Image: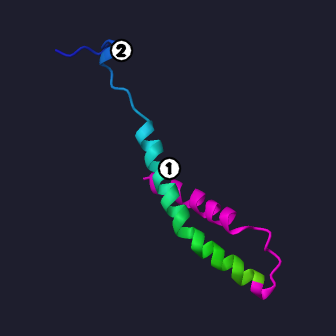
């Protein structure tokens, strides 16, 4: 018969490291995917004379990756 109060050494501990590692891998992949598109958008804005050139391509790609990656892990 199983007891409800098992000793602490037998309890399963949830390891957060693989999830963090997986999150980092997905973040890096999405960041690398969006980096060329962010650079092209930055060049297009510079060529057309738009005023939002202050956002660099790296920060724009970082922002996109930071918003998309958590959506993958919500499920």
Q: Is residue 52 magenta?
A: yes
Quadrant containing the N terminus in the rendered view = top left
Residue 31: give x, y in percent of width and height: 55, 62
Reply above or below: 44 against 6: below
Residue 20: give x, y in percent of width and height: 48, 43
Stretch of the chain drawn in magenta: 47-75
Q: Secondary structure at mark 2?
A: helix
- Closer to us: 30 or 13: 30
Residue 43: give x, y in percent of width and height: 70, 80
Q: Relative to residue 25, is residue 37 drawn left or right?
A: right
Crowding near the residue tagged with mark 2, few <14, some 14–19, many ≥20 C-alpha atoms within 10 Å? few
Tag 2 residue: 8
Tag 1 residue: 24
Residue displayed at 76% across by 86% down: 47
Q: Is residue 58 magenta?
A: yes
Secondary structure character of the magenta stretch overall: helix
């Amino acid at each position: 018969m199983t007891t409800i109060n098992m000793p602490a050494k037998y309890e399963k501990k949830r390891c957060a490291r693989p999830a963090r590692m997986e999150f980092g891998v997905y973040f890096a992949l999405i960041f690398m995917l969006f980096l060329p598109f962010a650079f092209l958008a930055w060049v297009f804005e510079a060529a057309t004379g738009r005023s939002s050139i202050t956002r660099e391509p790296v920060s724009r790609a970082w922002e996109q990756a930071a918003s998309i990656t958590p959506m993958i892990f919500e499920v």
